Structure formats: structure tokens, C-alpha cells
Amino acid sequence: MSVDLLDMAWSSDSAYIYFDTLLTEKPGYFRLRVSDSKLEHILSLKEFRSFLGQWGGQSWTSLGPGETPLFVHDISTQEIYALDVEFP
């Protein structure tokens, strides 16, 4: 998979890199384990309406406390939502 990693985020222990693929045909949120390059698909963002910024073209994702994924969702206002994700 070829991905533009402009909004990647490191886990607090530097063991993982988190990133989204919002601007691709199969939008999703992933994490990559640095030690062995294992790629994990965390969730699909297929129906997610992202806020592409004032000039468009780039979304924003990051990590909150406890490595909670953060996304900017477009509902005609700018709000930030936190999703509960349980990792195996």
C-alpha cells in the first residue's frame, strides 16, 4: 500500500505509528508496529465525512490520551470526536 503519511502519529512508547488513508479509495485508520512492520487495520473510514481544512485536500488525525484516535468530522461545524477502540 502506498500512503501519504502527512498526519502520522507515534504511540507514547514509540512502538507504533498511527495513520489514516482518508484520501484513498479505501479510507481507513491503521497502525504500524515498528519492530516488525506489522500493519494493522483499526477501522474503516469509508462513510466518514472528514473536514478537509480551509483550503481542502488534507484531513487531520492524531492521538489523544491513552492513544485514542482523534478525527475532525465535517458536520458543517468543526468538532473533534474520540472513538473507543479496543486493540487485541
Image: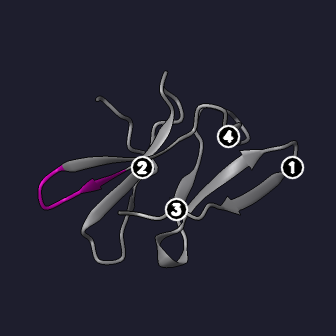
- Tag 1's secondary structure? loop
Tell me the quadrant of the picture where the C terminus can be found: bottom left
Q: Amino acid at mark 2?
A: Phe
For residue 50, the mark is: 4
Marks 3 and 4, how far apart at CA: 18 Å
Marks 2 and 4, how far apart at CA: 14 Å
The verdict on residue 35 being magenta is: yes
Marks 1 and 2, how far apart at CA: 23 Å
The verdict on residue 10 being magenta is: no
Q: Seen in the image, is 40 located left or right of residue 29?
A: left
Instruction: Please name which of the two marks, 1 or 3, marks the residue nearer to the observer.
Output: 3
Bounds of the magenta segment: 31-37
Q: Earlier in the sequence, mark 3 or mark 4?
A: 4
Q: Position of residue 19 (x, y in %)?
A: 42, 49
Marks 1 and 3, how far apart at CA: 24 Å
Marks 4 and 1, how far apart at CA: 11 Å
Query: Label 2: few (<14), some or many (≥20) within 10 Å?
Result: many
- Tag 2's secondary structure? strand
Q: Seen in the image, is 17 located left or right of residue 26?
A: left
Q: Which residue is mark 3?
A: 85
Q: Which residue is mark 2?
A: 19
Rendered residue at 38%/43% (across/down): 5
For residue 77, the mark is: 1
